Structure formats: structure tokens, C-alpha cells
Amino acid sequence: MKLLPPSFYRRSTKQIARDLLGKTLCRRFDDGSVQRARIVETEAYLGADDAACHSFGHRRTERVRSMYLPGGHAYIYLIYGMYDCLNVVTKSTKEPEAVLIRAIEPLDFVPLGKVKKTALPTNGPGKLCRFWKITRAHDGLALFTRKSAIWIEEGERTERIVATTRVGVDYAGDAAAWPLRFYLEGNPFVSKR
């Protein structure tokens, strides 16, 4: 499939979060094997003016260093001291914004019968990173080249997109109510309903 070009990532973060749904996230492992999955859930984080964003107020710390790269790079951070989370940096070096990949549907994994949501391996940002062994060592990788361990290709989407509020950002004042979480309606791998 065709790679998403750098220009894809240097647009409106909210639009990118919607447009990533149905695209194909790819992961090359140390043994050279490659796995692919459909992106089924995302959240947009709008930088300096978004109290839920790590770069709120143009915060510059070692943790958010990758958010100041040009759009199309990975920003990976640790939450709760135990879960890595994969984000796609958007826009420019002066606009530190990103899209969190909340859930993916592995293209080589088919749930058999009724599977409990808790048993699905990639229906949450921490779970998908653990399943695919994505760590902070991958922070800053370019996502628009197959030379990276992680990249994004074109994909298909037929499902309706649902927009709602983001998960776990109650501390963010008015920004907590912004409808910046997007998912594919009816997809079993979506993290929360």
C-alpha cells in the first residue's frame, strides 16, 4: 500500500485525527517481520491552547521534545508509570500538536466467537503498544518511511465516524468537553463506548 506522505501530517490536527481512521499502521519487528493493523480510534491534542495536551502553554520538557518535530513523527510517552502511548505528531515545529492512536484492529487477528473486550490485545493505547512492543525507544521516528520500525500506509474505511469527548482528561477544564475523540462506529476494537 502507498505510504502517507509528510504533507498528510502537516494539516489541521482535528482533520488528521479523522483521516487516520481506516489507515494502516505498520510495525517492523527486530526479526524483520511486519504486522499491519487498521487504525480504529484516535484523539486530537491541539497544542499550546489545549489544557489536555502535553505541550499546553508551549511547555518544553524532555518528555515532549518530539512534539516539536515536523508533522509525521512519533511521539511516545509513558502514562501511569507503566504504559507507553503512540502519538502522531502533526503540523509544524512551531505548533506542537499530536494525535493519540487509541486503538487498532490487527489485520492478522480475528476474534473467535464472543471475545470479552478485556481480552482484545489492541483496544486501548497502552495495550496496543504492549502488544506491538512499541516503547519510548521509538519516540521521534519518522512515520512516512518504511525504513522506520513504525509507519502508516493508506487504508480503507466504510464505517461511519463517531466524534465524542476524549478519555481521561477531566483535569483540562473546558478542553475536557471538546469533541476530539474519533472512532469507527461498531468496530469491536474501539477502547470505550
Image (cartoon, grey):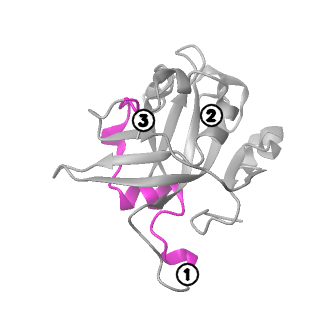
Tag shown at residue 16: 2
User: Contact, CB < 8 Å: mark 3 with mark 2?
Assistant: no
Q: Position of residue 29 (x, y in %)?
A: 24, 50
Residue type at the position of mark 1: Lys
Indicate left or right for 82 with 114 as reference. Answer: left
Indicate left or right for 153 with 20 as reference. Answer: left
Indicate left or right for 33 with 84 as reference. Answer: left
The residue under label 3 is 2
Secondary element under disc 3, as helix, strand or loop, is: loop
Highlighted magenta segment, given as a residue range? 116-144
Question: From mark 1 to mark 3, how far is it between C-alphas?
Answer: 34 Å
- Residue 3 position by quadrant: top left
Residue type at the position of mark 3: Lys
- Is the residue 148 above or below the residue 9 in the image? below
Q: Position of residue 73 (x, y in %)?
A: 43, 29
Secondary element under disc 1, as helix, strand or loop, is: loop
Q: Which quadrant of the rendered structure holds the C terminus?
A: bottom right
- Is the residue 107 above or below the residue 102 in the image? below
Tag shown at residue 116: 1
